[in-house]
């Protein structure tokens, strides 16, 4: 059964036999005679005033959509493959090369006309294995393997998360990406990519274009390490003329190629609008749809007569970290996302186109044929084989998407009716060829010269200010040095005066010392002289005393002698 989470298949009977959308089960094999009931699911039927395929017929509230969104996000594989990718060995499991073109298939439910005419269902899908079964009658059946398949009951959200979300993620990291819808007219390509939805169903029917922008703004709001800019342009390729859907006066844009990088250049440049929020893109797409060429024919009352290309350019500018020599060189990662709603391939027998509509169909088929030739050449090419990109402006615009450096997802849209078995088979084989293409992914990370110039100018301003401050400080220092020198000179003069005074004082001191020494010598000489005189006087006194003593002794002796004589006498 279809693994679309909470989204059931209203057109299936209790026994498991699909009556619309062709979902294969293990219970029974469907019959080519089965038709859808009037109440079955419906992506859309051609009718007056209908631009795209109509909703599935079952509304979902916002909460259920959010749950489904989270459930599907958790199912994204680490290799970046499609959600719901089958686990069996096969084409869809060749995930070794992340640059391989991923191809999914979507079957729309039967239209009211097909139900009324009781056209048999010739398509059956098995989402759990990634296979589609095509039946021309009850005895002939062919099966093909894809990266993912979606029945008529699959939601827009599931298709986006499976097909486009990995591409958007790569674009945010600097890779180019392409999501393209291919198929017969009236099979739901514009509904899948360009549906704007409405508020009544909680925007559940919005297509890949609106959801991609919404997803981009959601993811960049979570990235605090970088600043982002998102620009958009909307083109149509009408009868091999590139026209700007946002500027109808720019109706003959030429395609050129950058010789150095090989990237496609458009001259004159289409109007580029910087997106400011999620709702901005809806208004712009509404403007573009008014200018897109459409027509009415048997298979589609509002058939696109041109290939529409929404170009989204996401520039990621990492915030500057560090200063001076530690600052990293500013870089910018620039990824470009192409969302391509191809006009449907047509057969005049089926559409019954005439006049201008027939001429438009010729150009549509011619460009699609050239796209098929390029894909065949890429798959079958020998070394240095020629790829006819230049045979159509469509293939020149998509050169990077097939065989280039972009990461590409292709969703092929088919109808369930066995009446268009041939067209359905061609569409399926187109997808089978595209699934073999392997691109060489290349990240576009360049030096952000504007930011680098701005940073260098800021650094120059800082250096100039520092130099001016240094000059002021130098002048101040010179003034201070002059003042210091004057002070030092003054101190030197004072020191010299002090030294002179000290020398004078020392001279005076020496003179005083000499005078004192002279005086001392004079005093010493006087002292010696006085001492000599005193010594003489002393000697003289001593002599006198000695003489007096001797005289006294003689007198005493004389007295004793007299006494003795008297005693004796």
Image (cartoon, rainbow, N blue to C red):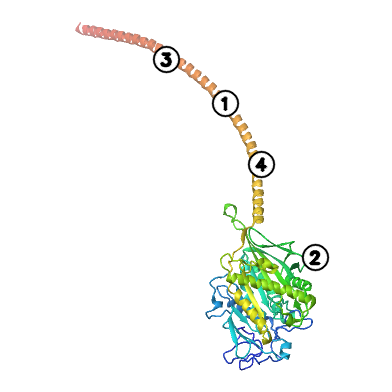
Q: Are marks 1 and 3 in contact (CB under 8 Å)?
A: no
Distance from disc 3 to disc 2, alpha carbons, whole Å, reads 134 Å
The label on residue 249 is: 2
Which numbered mark, 1 or 2, is in the foreground of this view? 2
- Identify the mark at residue 496; answer none if there is no mark: 1
Disc number lying in front (4 or 1)? 4
For marks 1 and 3, give the CA distance: 40 Å
| Quadrant of the frame with the N terminus | bottom right
Residue wearing tag 3: 524
Q: Residues within 10 Å of mark 2 (few under 14, many from 20)?
A: few
347 or 543: nearer the eye? 347
Q: Earlier in the sequence, mark 3 or mark 2?
A: 2
Q: Position of residue 500 (x, y in %)?
A: 56, 23
Asked if residue 408 is positioned above or below residue 492 in the image, the reply reads: below
The quadrant in which residue 36 appears is: bottom right
Work out whether mark 1 precedes mark 3 in sequence or the reverse, and give the earlier one: 1
Secondary structure of the residue carrying numbered label 2: loop
Residue furthest to the bottom in view is 15
- For the residue labelled by badge 4, is the local secondary structure a helix, a strand or a loop? helix
Contact flag, marks 2 and 4 (Cβ < 8 Å): no
Q: Which mark is residue 472?
A: 4
Local SS, label 3 = helix
């Amino acid at each position: 059964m279809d693994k679309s989470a909470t989204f059931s298949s209203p057109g299936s009977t209790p026994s498991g036999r699909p009556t619309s959308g062709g979902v294969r089960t293990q219970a029974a094999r469907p019959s080519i005679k089965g038709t859808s009931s009037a109440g079955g699911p419906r992506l859309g039927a051609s009718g007056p005033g209908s631009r795209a395929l109509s909703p599935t017929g079952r509304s979902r509230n916002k909460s259920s959509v959010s749950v489904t969104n989270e459930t599907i996000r958790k199912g994204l594989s680490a290799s970046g493959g499609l959600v719901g990718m089958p686990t069996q060995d096969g084409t869809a499991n060749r995930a070794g090369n992340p640059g391989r073109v991923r191809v999914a298939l979507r079957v729309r439910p039967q239209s009211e006309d097909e139900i009324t005419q009781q056209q048999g269902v010739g398509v059956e899908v098995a989402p759990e294995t990634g296979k589609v079964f095509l039946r021309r009658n009850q005895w002939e059946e062919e099966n093909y393997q894809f990266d993912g398949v979606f029945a008529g009951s699959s939601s827009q959200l599931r298709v986006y998360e499976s097909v486009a979300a990995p591409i958007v993620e790569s674009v945010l990291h600097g890779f180019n990406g392409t999501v393209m819808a291919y198929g017969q007219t009236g099979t739901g390509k514009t509904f899948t990519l360009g549906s704007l939805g409405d508020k009544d169903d909680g925007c559940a029917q919005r297509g890949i274009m609106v959801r991609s922008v919404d997803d981009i703004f959601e993811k960049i709001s979570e990235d605090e390490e970088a600043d982002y800019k998102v620009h958009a342009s909307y083109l149509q390729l009408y009868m091999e003329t590139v026209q700007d859907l946002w500027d109808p006066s720019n109706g003959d844009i030429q395609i050129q190629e950058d010789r150095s990088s090989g990237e496609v250049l458009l001259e004159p440049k289409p109007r580029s609008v910087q997106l400011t929020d999620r709702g901005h893109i809806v208004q712009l797409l509404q403007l573009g749809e008014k200018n897109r060429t459409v027509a009415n024919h048997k298979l589609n009352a509002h058939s696109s007569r041109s290939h529409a290309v929404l170009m989204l350019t996401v520039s990621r500018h990492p915030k500057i970290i560090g200063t001076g020599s530690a600052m990293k060189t500013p870089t910018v990662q620039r990824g470009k996302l192409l969302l391509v709603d191809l006009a449907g391939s047509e057969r005049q027998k089926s559409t019954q186109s005439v006049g201008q509509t027939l001429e438009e169909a010729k150009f549509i088929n011619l460009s699609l044929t050239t796209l098929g030739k390029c894909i065949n050449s890429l798959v079958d090419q020998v070394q240095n084989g020629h790829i006819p990109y230049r045979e159509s402006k469509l293939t020149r615009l998509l050169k990077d998407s097939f065989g280039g450096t972009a990461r590409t997802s292709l969703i092929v849209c088919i109808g369930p009716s066995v009446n268009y078995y041939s067209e359905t088979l061609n569409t399926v084989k187109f997808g089978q060829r595209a699934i073999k293409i392997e691109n060489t992914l290349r990240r576009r990370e360049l030096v952000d010269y504007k930011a680098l110039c701005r940073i260098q100018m800021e650094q120059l301003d800082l250096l100039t200010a520092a130099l001016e401050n240094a000059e002021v400080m130098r002048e101040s220092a010179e003034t201070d040095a002059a003042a210091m020198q004057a002070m030092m000179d003054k101190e030197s003069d004072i020191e010299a005066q002090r030294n002179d005074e000290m020398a004078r004082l020392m001279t005076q001191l020496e003179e005083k010392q000499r005078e004192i020494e002279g005086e001392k010598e004079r005093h010493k000489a006087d002292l010696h002289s006085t001492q000599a005189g005193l010594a003489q006087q002393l000697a003289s006194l001593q002599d006198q005393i000695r003489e007096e003593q001797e005289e006294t002794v003689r007198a005493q002796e004389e007295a004793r002698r007299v006494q003795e004589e008297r005693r004796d006498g």
